[in-house]
Image: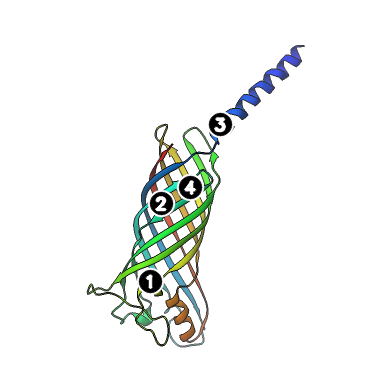
Amino acid sequence: MKRLFTILIAIFCMTAAFAQETEKSTFKVSVGGGAFVGGSFSYWSVDKDLPGDIHRYNSSHLSVGPYLFVDLTYAEISLGFPLGFLNADDTMSDNPNFPARTYALRGGAYLKYPFTLSPKFTLFPLLGIDYDLYLLAKRDDDRDATFPISSSNQSAKPIDALNTLWFKTGAGLDTSLTDHLFLRTEFLYGLRLPNEMEKHLKDTRNGVNWTINHGGDLKVSVGYRF
């Protein structure tokens, strides 16, 4: 009888713990906003037998800006406003359109799965996409910057030349500040498709074997859980 009573107590404790964990993992909606810093790096594999620096086509695009998010427990939707600095590669260093200051909209959609580490901390992996829509680019002299996208169009607007789709993965951590407020930190890294300017340059440059475009983001925000 004593053994049966011990087993019943153990079952009761396990059931109570499971019920408590289920309650914690119920569907919740959160909203919030913060800031991010990110970088996009373009690596070009060039035939080593050709004269010149094999890194002459490599470039970078650094950005920072505010963003907003809506969290649906297992999904996150975000809207950001990247303010960027597009560096030229060595072959276009004398082009007055480079370097360029860029202004864009970034829409993101991610799947996530939260793991409760403690009442204060929740960890979640992320997998999804970002799309960068470039609205404006400015040269050093504050005139509009333009970009080559074909042999007949060497002066395309950024919305026609720079837009790109990202595929990213990463992880985030929510730190509870109160019953409703929390601090969210995320790190994302991934690959992006070449934009129209890069497609054109790849077709016209000598000795290019392949290209890879990659980068990541660090995000910090404050959210409110309903």
**Would you name the residue on which mark 4 appears?**
172
Q: Which residue type does callout 3 highlight?
A: Glu
Marks 4 and 2, the one that precedes in the sequence: 4
Could you tell me which residue is drawn at 49 percent across and 55 percent down? 109
Number of residues whose C-alpha sits closer than 10 Å to that of mark 4, classed few (under 14), some (14–19) or many (20 or more): many
Tag on residue 23?
A: 3
Q: Quadrant of residue 113?
A: top right
Q: Are marks 4 and 2 in contact (CB under 8 Å)?
A: yes
**Image position of 179 with respect to 193: above or below:** above
Q: Which residue type does callout 4 highlight?
A: Gly
Q: Are marks 4 and 3 in contact (CB under 8 Å)?
A: no
| Residue in the foreground of this view, choosing between 38 and 151 | 151
Gap in Å between the C-alphas at discs 2 and 3?
Answer: 28 Å
**Would you name the residue on which mark 1 appears?**
159
Could you tell me which residue is drawn at 48 percent across and 37 percent down? 121
Could you tell me which residue is drawn at 48 percent across and 49 percent down? 76
Viewer-nearest of labels 4 and 1?
Answer: 1
**Would you name the residue on which mark 2 appears?**
219
Gap in Å between the C-alphas at discs 1 and 2?
Answer: 25 Å
Marks 4 and 3, the one that precedes in the sequence: 3
Image coordinates for residue 111, horizontal then vertical, percent: 54, 51
Q: How is the image coloured?
A: rainbow
